[in-house]
Image (spheres, grey):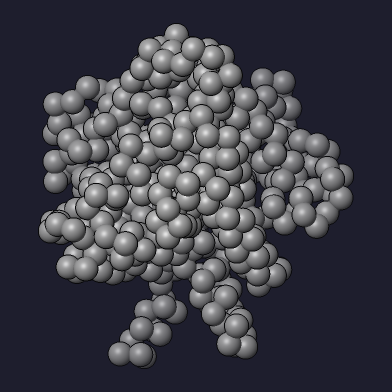
Amino acid sequence: MRRALARWLSRTPPPAVLASGYLALVVLGAVLLLLPPMTRQPITLMDALFTSTSAVTVTGLAVIDTELVLTFWGQLVVAVLIQLGGLGLMTIAVLVWSALGLPVGITQGTYLREDLNQTSYVRLTRLVWTIFRVVIVAEIAGAMLLCLSFMPNHGLAQGLWHAVFHSVSAFNNAGFSTFSPGLTGYALDPIVNVVIPALFIVGGIGYVVVSDMWTRVFWRGWSLHTRLMIIGTAVLIVLGVGLTAALEWSNPRTLGQYDSWVARMTVAWFQGVTTRTAGFNSTDIGGLHDSTSLLYMALMIIGGGPTSTAGGLKVTTIVVMVLATIAFLRRRTEIWAFGRSIALGDVLKAMALISIASAVIFTAVFLMALSHDGEFIDIAFEVSSAFGTTGLSRGYTAELSDFGRIVIMVVMFLGRVGPLTLGFFLATRMMPRVRYPAGQVHLG
């Protein structure tokens, strides 16, 4: 058995091994959730699989009420699945190996490199320990601060658990909440509106960026990746918050229910920044205008940063494509930013990611529209949320059939593991034996 496993690992590409690991974790989580102590009422196998998939992929879409259906032990299982899925399986494994004093070999380094989306083996172990320190500090600090809001309303023990769960869920950009209505009851709470966004922004911006900002000189010492992520994230936050306020200002189901402009901007702030990655809601998502929903779909698909707890296409992928478009319009043969050029291979990778993601989203929306009678905007929003592993919903998750749940689970899985992994399975590696003369293709 051990030899067969070793032979399979040696012959199987790292993306396939990692995808298999995440799939095994999903199955294990589903089995645990089916145990009697985990729920207050029996749930189906499909309920357990969907919940486990949503937790491992740090999405947050739910077909059962986390507060009313799951017991403390069930919620604990979900929190552990979120933590494992957010950190990544290889990150956890390397932490265990390092704690036991075992060296990280070439094979483990290869898997870790794929899991963290890195192109080099350099400083991988150091990056893992940086991740560990960031996670511990952020989640403990977040839980302690959230206790100030949750304990007065729910008591010492229950308030502490709500704080810990939301801290883990927020940092890992999961969007799961132990409150049935989400965070709508804390829409104007200053601590929640600062701590929760701080957690998912730090978790979603990427560990490499956090390490650069912590250890290197401001701006000049930062890498090109860090600079692009900071600027891209800032632009998306401003657009998300600003357009949310502009589009929903007079909507009585969302911002318009508040008389104060401060209250409206507070809700616009929280909902505008949580949309790309975390999936918490402090207002009625089903009450959004269609224009706002379309904006949120774009933000969810973009997602967060590489080597982070967020899903989606990633901010740097979009930034690279924008830079490539600008270079084309200016008739430049080289793509650059901040005095550094961007390799053609990175542009091709971004194109592949966007192409495969578009195909996945289109196919999922087509299958859902074919098999469900709901509003098209609700279906497209659900698929976008699943691919971006965001977890926001216009109230359509409960309407999914078993086939629809399977489609959404596949999309969540692909959104977390990465479209390139799907492309890896579809592609065959063939060395070109013949070179052909260049031909002309008319585009546009």
Residue nearer the viewer, 99 or 90: 99
Residue nearer the viewer, 210 or 181: 181
Count of marks overlaid on the render: 0
Residue 371 visible within the image: yes
What's the residue at 51%, 44% (across, down)?
A: 149
Expressed as whole percent of the image width and height from the top left, the position of residue 180 reads 31, 42
What's the residue at 65%, 28% (across, down)?
A: 235
Residue 410 visible within the image: no
Residue 144 position by quadrant: bottom right
Determine whether, in the image, residue 286 is placed left or right of residue 151.
left
Expressed as whole percent of the image width and height from the top left, the position of residue 389 reads 41, 44
Residue 322 position by quadrant: top right
What's the residue at 45%, 9% (across, down)?
A: 250
Q: Is residue 424 above or below residue 179?
A: below
Residue nearer the viewer, 385 or 440: 385
What's the residue at 73%, 27% (across, down)?
A: 332
Expressed as whole percent of the image width and height from the top left, the position of residue 220 reads 87, 44
Determine whether, in the image, residue 145 is placed left or right of residue 424.
right
Determine whether, in the image, residue 211 is placed left or right of residue 376.
right
Expressed as whole percent of the image width and height from the top left, the position of residue 25 reads 34, 67
Q: Name the image quarter holding the N terminus.
A: bottom left
Q: Is residue 96 above or below residue 306?
A: below
Residue nearer the viewer, 439 or 110: 110
